[in-house]
């Protein structure tokens, strides 16, 4: 049997089937929504956002050429037929295949997601654990206060504040983004990381606190186990379980691009691309991005489930 | 005198919940603390073991164990005594061990915590011997199991095996049979008596079942609302003085024409 995956072959195939079905559904719905939304992609493509007079004939010719005059369902099937062969259409906005543009923006988003998640974990795990262990100490009160403020701050405001402090006032970091480099990464990663860390610290604290009140902890103390053994070998492995689910959700979210923060810092990632493509009605690109976001979510969720099965023997045995 | 508890008061925060408890116990003796839920009987043995939950603390009196003033113990003193010289069997031992770790790992970790000079393999052998002693078939299998894979009775035996591994001088049993069916209850009680016989340990048995209590014990304490209403030897059963004790005895079912505590 495969050691890395405790789901059975059948379960795994089932999950992959599910992912394919959901992707089909999502692609259909986005396709329909883009069609229904106001604005004409053909005009947009010819004129961009400028006021250029174009003859109706020219518009119709291009519409025909792009297949946009066909009935909706045929357009969808055309798109689907090409999509299964790996061709996700052509972006009018950047005049490149969608898949190429996605791949072009992906590294920036992955770098930002990893950096902000690492920062978040480095802050929230020690702070959450310590605050739970020293329950009701001054440290705990401080953490509770700060994280309360943290979860109430919107991303964009935090981003602007950091820009103002570190970019304008202190002049430590560049204000102008638009490229991927260590200096330009710091502020967007901090922005995402701080807000997530606030949420996560509270979660780690609550989970560890709940585990510390479980009977097995009383039992371990009655057996004379040391407090450090209880924390590291008994409590934390149990507390990991709910935290991994959360971590998966936030990481999946980040891989879809953090639109607001990417816009604030002109970070050339998927979120930035998504907003641009919507503004320009570049619907093949929108479609591609939405599918990517959905796919990331489901793949990460599958990985979370597999790891869950791995960590919790009750699930592992029940699955067999 | 192994355990000498004098005028023990226990409070949660500033609220006095148990007061004026006296216990004198020698090697090989079994004392039962009987009473309804909320009478403070579990609180008493938790205080003896130094593991009162939350804001609970001893607010008066003294606890002397093996000539040592237990109220002067540091946390590390308590850690060393708990699980070695003194150990506890819980109502559901299965809940008192980590649900996501194998029983064997937890048992050997526990042995190594009090006997760090032993190797892992030696600790595992010790654990298997003890599981065998409490009549659990196929100890290796038990060692490889997770708590949820065993029945309530088997988990309780694992609990007893763990509690007995260092032949403690004092065994505290907190409603050890309440979660079990009647047949298993009898086996578990017999097991505890066997353990007393073999190691000459003193036992405090907390139960709401005065029938079980009178069947095994030399001494009894009857508690109600945090107070001791009656205490003494077996004469309490034959000739109860307090109305509450009489009530508890009257609640024991009759088998044939005998109450089953009469032996």
Image (spheres, rainbow, N blue to C red):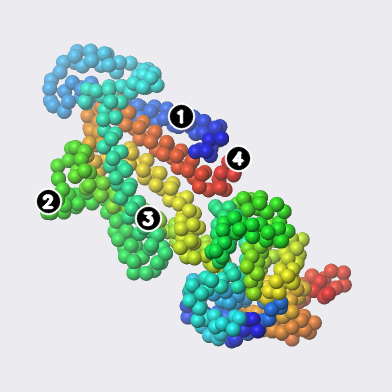
> How far apart are labels 2 and 3 at the CA level?
31 Å
- Residue B221, by quadrant, is bottom right
- Residue B177 visible in image: yes
> How far apart are labels 3 and 4 at the CA level?
33 Å
Task: Tell me the residue that label 2 is attached to.
Answer: A171
> How far apart are labels 2 and 4 at the CA level?
59 Å
Circle 2 residues within 10 Å: few <14, some 14–19, many ≥20: few
Return the disc, 1 or 3, that comes first in the chain's sequence.
1
Q: Residue at x 74, y 61 (%)?
A: B184
Give the secondary structure at mark 3.
helix
Q: Residue at x 49, y 61 (%)?
A: A230
Disc 3: host chain: A
Task: Tell me the residue that label 4 is attached to.
Answer: A320
Task: Tell me the residue that label 1 is attached to.
Answer: A21
Return the disc, 1 or 4, that comes first in the chain's sequence.
1
> How far apart are labels 1 and 4 at the CA level?
25 Å
Residues A240 and B86: in front is: B86
Disc 2: host chain: A
* Left or right placement of residue B44 versus residue A272 in this view: right
Task: Tell me the residue that label 3 is attached to.
Answer: A125
Give the secondary structure at mark 1.
helix
Give the secondary structure at mark 4.
loop
Return the disc, 1 or 2, that comes first in the chain's sequence.
1
Q: Nearer the viewer, mark 1 or mark 3?
A: 3
Indicate the position of residue A50 as horizontal and vertical percent values. 13, 26
* Left or right placement of residue B5 versus residue A155 in this view: right
Classify A44 as above or below B252.
above
Return the disc, 2 or 3, that comes first in the chain's sequence.
3
* Total marks placed: 4
Classify B70 as above or below A202.
below
């Amino acid at each position: 049997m495969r050691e890395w995956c405790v789901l059975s072959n059948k379960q795994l195939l089932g999950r992959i089937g599910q992912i394919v079905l959901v992707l089909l559904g999502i692609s259909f719905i986005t396709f329909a929504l883009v069609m229904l939304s106001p604005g004409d992609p053909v005009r947009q493509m010819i004129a961009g956002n400028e006021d250029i007079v174009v003859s109706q004939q020219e518009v119709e010719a291009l519409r025909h050429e792009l297949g946009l005059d066909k009935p909706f369902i045929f357009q969808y099937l055309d798109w689907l037929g090409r999509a299964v062969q790996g061709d996700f259409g052509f972006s009018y906005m950047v005049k490149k295949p969608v898949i190429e543009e996605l791949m072009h923006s992906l590294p920036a988003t992955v770098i930002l997601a990893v950096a902000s998640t690492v920062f978040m974990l480095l802050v929230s795990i020690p702070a959450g654990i310590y605050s739970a262990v020293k329950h009701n100490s001054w440290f705990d009160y401080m953490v509770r206060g700060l994280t309360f403020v943290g979860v109430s701050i919107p991303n964009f405001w935090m981003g602007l504040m950091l820009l103002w402090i570190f970019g304008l006032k202190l002049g430590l970091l560049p204000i102008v983004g638009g490229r991927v480099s260590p200096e330009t990464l710091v502020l967007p990663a901090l922005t995402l990381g701080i807000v997530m860390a606030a949420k996560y610290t509270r979660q780690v604290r609550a989970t560890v606190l709940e585990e510390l009140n479980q009977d097995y902890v009383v039992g371990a103390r009655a057996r004379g186990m040391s407090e450090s053994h209880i924390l590291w070998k008994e409590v934390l492995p149990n507390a990991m379980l709910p935290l991994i689910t959360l971590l998966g959700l936030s990481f999946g979210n980040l891989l879809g691009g953090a639109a607001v923060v990417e816009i604030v810092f002109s970070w050339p990632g998927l979120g930035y691309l998504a907003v641009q493509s919507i503004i320009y009605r570049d619907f093949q690109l929108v479609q591609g991005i939405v599918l990517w976001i959905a796919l990331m979510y489901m793949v990460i969720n599958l990985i979370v489930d597999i790891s869950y099965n791995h960590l919790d023997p009750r699930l592992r045995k029940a699955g067999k | 005198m192994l355990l000498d508890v004098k005028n023990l008061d226990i409070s949660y925060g500033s609220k006095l919940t148990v007061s004026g408890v006296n216990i004198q116990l020698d090697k090989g003796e079994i004392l039962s603390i009987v009473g309804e839920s909320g009478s403070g009987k579990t609180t008493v043995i938790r205080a003896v073991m130094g593991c009162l939950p939350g804001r609970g603390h001893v607010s008066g009196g003294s606890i002397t164990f093996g000539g040592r003033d237990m109220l002067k113990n540091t946390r590390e003193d308590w850690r060393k005594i708990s699980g070695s010289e003194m150990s506890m069997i819980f109502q559901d031992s299965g809940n008192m061990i980590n649900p996501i770790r194998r029983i064997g790992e937890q048992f050997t970790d526990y042995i190594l915590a009090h006997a760090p000079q032993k190797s892992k393999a030696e600790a595992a052998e010790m654990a298997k011997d003890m599981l065998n002693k409490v009549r659990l078939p196929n100890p290796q299998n038990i060692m490889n199991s997770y708590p949820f894979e065993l029945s309530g009775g088997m988990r309780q035996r694992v609990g007893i095996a763990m509690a007995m591994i260092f032949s403690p001088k004092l065994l505290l049993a907190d409603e050890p049979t309440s979660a079990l069916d009647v047949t298993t209850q009898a086996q578990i009680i017999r097991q505890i008596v066997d353990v007393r016989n073999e190691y000459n340990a003193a036992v405090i048995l907390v139960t709401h079942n005065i029938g079980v209590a009178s069947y095994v014990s030399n001494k009894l304490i009857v508690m109600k609302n945090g107070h001791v209403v009656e205490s003494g030897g077996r004469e309490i059963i034959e000739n109860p003085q307090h109305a509450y004790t009489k009530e508890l005895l009257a609640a024991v079912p009759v088998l044939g024409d005998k109450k089953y505590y009469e032996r």
